[in-house]
Image: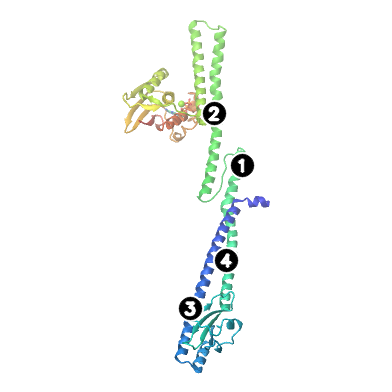
Amino acid sequence: MKFTQRINRVSLKLGLLFSSVFLALIFILEMVLYGVFTNIFVDYVTQDLLARGNNHAKILEANYNQSTIDHVVTMEKGSRTAVLITDAKNQIIASSVKPDQDMKSHILENGTVKKNEVIEKDWNEHDYLIAVISIGKNNGHLYMYYPSKIIKEIVLVLKILIFFTFIGTILLSFGLIGILSQKLTRPLLIMKDATKRMAKGEYEQTILIKGNDEVAQLAKSIQSLGEQLQEYEDTRNDFLADVSHELRTPLTYIKGYSDIVSKGMYKTSEEQAEYISIINKEANRLSFLLNDLFEMSKLQVGKFELKREKADVHIIIEKVINNLIPAALEKGIVIKDETAIHLPEMYMDVQRMEQVFYNLIENAIKYTDKGEITVKSYQQKEMIVIEIKDTGIGIPSQDIPKIWDRFYRVDKSRTRKTGGSGLGLFLVKQIVEGHGGRIFVNSVEDVGSIFSIYLKSN
Ligand SMILES: Nc1ncnc2c1ncn2[C@@H]1O[C@H](COP(=O)(O)OP(=O)(O)OP(=O)(O)O)[C@@H](O)[C@H]1O
Ligand SMILES: [Mg+2]
């Protein structure tokens, strides 16, 4: 893999981002700690110097003679700190260590008198932290020294610690990049490969990604998308076969009978009328099929606009039933209209709603051999309910969820003789839901089906 390809990898980018944020935070934190530590520590040491110097000065003041001076100096010998005593003229008279240049340079000039105070705090520049305390009146001064070397050593240890935490953080972030690429990039690459194969037409892909996080969910969605595409592909192929079959049958009839009529090959005018009526019926069938296909393509490209107007469902249903009575009678089926007359008017696309009832009642006739069809409507709270009930062949329970899919038809052999493309219920559902309504079906095989539509009455 080329470097540019590597640098583009999501895990590397994320890892670098995380680690730089992390490093910056640690850096700030450590700087704060460093500042706080050195300040507090220096304050503590200088206060301690002052306190101890004060004690020494008090002893000296109480009893200012050579033996007390020796005693004070001896007390400081062997400790980290050093003491130095000067007389009233600021001349050194005793010291616990041999005074070096930095110690001497802080001794006050002759004539200068200082009270108790810290005169040197800068451990970075000087060899000692220094406090000076005056011994009574005109008895000179006492100096306490704390070697900066000790602080410098502690600070060095601190710096080494900071350095190692930095190195540790960098190593950790590389580890993080590794883990990220395992957890994030690898599944993404697997998905990329899978979608590439899907693009080539191998829709059904098994994408093995463990867990249930967003990435795993995405993998599952891609997989089910593939399955759906496969299903569409299958139904589309079936559909094309169906469509060509459906088109061919009426076209053969139309061609055959129009041939006969145009050549005058009939005996009576009744015969001629019958042929023409067959031609007319078949042309109607073609136009219905094309109409459904056209409607579906409109739904698919999202050009589905409802032309709503105030309307009475009862009137729409009545019209549809009247149109379908002849077809029902032909099969010996009665259509009972039990729709309520005084339901509130609703805003709806009348033509599309007509199509809904037409498709549902037409199905009821198509899939019923004997018995009756009942169309009911009533109000239930804020809902208007419309039910289309038949005593037909029913729908097997495993097919019920699929009947709303495009091109789906239960058992092809069962429905082939009835004709149809499997678009009817798809259109019905889209239209009802487009009106903010819901549609359900209740069906028992060999007993019958009830399709119920719920529409909001306001
Ligand atoms: N009332 C019903 N009784 C039994 N089966 C039904 C009923 N309504 C629909 N079905 C089943 O559901 C399938 C889908 O119905 P749909 O109306 O979508 O298609 P179709 O009637 O086959 O064709 P068309 O597009 O011409 O309406 C039908 O093929 C049929 O198997
Ligand atoms: Mg139908």
- As displayed, is residue 183 above or below residue 50? above
Return the residue nearer the eye: 378 or 208. Answer: 378
The image shows residue 197, relative to residue 95, as above or below, that is: above
Task: Place residue 255 in its image quadrant.
Answer: top right
Q: Is mark 4 on a helix, strand or loop?
A: helix
- Foreground: disc 3 or disc 4: 3
- Point out the tag, 3 or 2, that comes first from the N-terminus: 3
Q: Earlier in the sequence, mark 1 or mark 2?
A: 1
Work out which residue is located at the far top of the displayed protein and give it: 268
Q: Determine whether label 1 and label 3 are within 8 Å by CB.
A: no
Distance of mark 4 from mark 2, alpha carbons?
Answer: 67 Å
Residue 121 in view here: yes
Mark 4 sits on what residue?
A: 165
Q: In which quarter of the image is residue 449?
A: top left
Q: Is mark 2 within 8 Å of ligand 1?
A: no
- Residue 337's place in the image compared with 268, above or below, is below
Query: How much space separates mark 3 and mark 4, taking CA atoms?
Result: 32 Å
Observer-nearest of 179 and 249: 179
- Identified at 58% across, 58% down, the residue is 20
Q: SS for tag 1?
A: helix
Of labels 1 and 4, earlier in sequence is 4
Total numbered labels: 4
- Percent across and percent down for residue 380 are 32, 32
Picture disc at residue 196:
1
Q: How far apart are marks 1 and 3 (CA)?
A: 74 Å
Horizontal relation, residue 115 to residue 102: left or right: left
Question: What is the three-letter code of the residue carrying label 3?
Answer: Gln
Q: What scheme was used to colour the molecule?
A: rainbow
Q: Position of residue 156 (x, y in %)?
A: 59, 73
Circle 3 sits on which residue? 47
Kind of residue at disc 2: Phe
User: Considering the image in quadrants, where does the C terminus appear?
Assistant: top left
